Image (cartoon, rainbow, N blue to C red):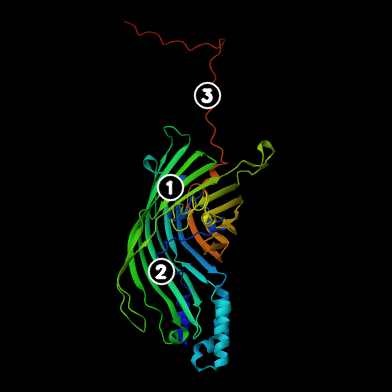
Amino acid sequence: MKRLFLAITALTLAGTLAATERPMAVRGARALGMGDAFTAMADDQNIFFYNPAGLVQRTGSAFTLLDIPVTVGNDVTKIIDFINDNEDDLKNFDTLLPARQAALINQINRDLVTLRPTFGFGAPNLSYLSGPVVGGFFWGAGLFGQASGRVGFVYDVLTPSLYYDINIDAAPMVSLAKHFDSLPILPGHLGVGATLKYLNRAQASDTRVSFIQLDSYDAPPLQRGKGHGIDFGALYQPTARLNIAATWMDFGGTQLKFDALAAEDGFDARPARTAGIPQRLNVGVAWTPARLGLGPLGLPTGDRLTLAADVRDVLNEDSKVLLDGGLIADSAGKHIHLGAEYRWWFLRFRAGANQGYATAGLGIDIPVLKLDYAFFSDEEGDFAGSLKHSAHIVSLALRFGSGRTEAQERVGAKPAPAPTPAPPATATEKAPEAAPAPAN
């Protein structure tokens, strides 16, 4: 029984089975609260996963210590409740009466096969972001780790069976960005940046394992892979209120080389293999309006509101955004993210739409401590609205630094007044006498 609990605990870190590797992304609660529309918003530790060019928005340095995000899918409690309520029957399934076996199998196939319980646990992540340094350059570095994925029941008419796919990632990252104060033709400012990352991934997966087998298994062995990748980003700011951004994540595809895994403890051997994280082109905008509405009749925002929108993975050939049965593809909704954030005192109120599903979030931002929560849903089908999966995320971080904590705070900041020039001398004022010429 102890082994069963160990295996179930490990399996609840599992994730979606896929032919290609999932990106290594520590999704932020701040971003998810506003629909994950963050390509043009990133100005904190999220720059490592959304846009390295966001570094140029910083006015000072920031050191983030013990950033711990925890994600729990809505379906998790249903799976846990079922396992707790039927623990003995699952363990001793082969000794049950046929009627009880049939009832248990029917309940699993009817109520649980469609569930997608997910977990995500971030390690105490560390990161440093600089303010502006020599020549308009900015830099940042971070060490990130997380275990993420999914476990679920698969349809089976004979015995209760599970699938699982676990990713345990660790990745050091280094970012460099350059700010251009002026452009030859366009108004405003431009920032460009890149993030270099080295990904270590430990993975365990199985498409089907029965509870009868699981009771005698230890936690599944992990196949280990590693590889390096690079992200590029750009951030154009025509005015202080408007950001326009684009990123090319995992440029060229990030290849992970996995070592061979020998058979052990009843688990099958796995050959050495190479798998890729596909590249993704994302675009986004963020706007801090002075008023909402028509001109002077609009509602003043006090420069506390930011609106954002993203279109992700624009060039995906399997799930297109444009020109697939029409100008806008049927699958375009799966790529769209909309969000808003309102700042009031130390509170941050957030809302948005992530792939067509409503999101909401709340943040507490006080010196040193930052606490964020978000409720969000992801689309796991081919089209927005076809297969909803909801989850909660909470993150806690200790942060130290200088400058403004969020880039959009600068919009409402008044510049220091220029020194007042001395008034010119009037005609009635006596001009100072010239010094006498030296004697010969």
Instruction: Return the residue at label 3.
Output: 421
Q: In the image, which is nearer the foreground, mark 1 or mark 3?
A: 1
Position of residue 117 in the picture relative to residue 218 (left or right): right
Label 2: which residue? 168
Q: Residues within 10 Å of mark 3 (few under 14, many from 20)?
A: few
Front one among 150 and 42: 150
N-terminal label among 1 and 3: 1
Separation (CA) of disc 1 from disc 3? 38 Å
Foreground: disc 2 or disc 3 = 2
Q: Decide if residue 245 is in sight here.
A: yes
Among the 4 quarters of the image, the one containing residue 223: bottom left
242 left or right of 295?
left
Query: Disc 2 residue type?
Result: Ile
Quadrant of the image containing the C terminus: top left
Q: Earlier in the sequence, mark 2 or mark 3?
A: 2
- Up the image or down, 240 lies above or below 363; here it is above
- Assign a secondary structure to mark 2: strand
Residue at point 51%, 90% (across, down) = 93
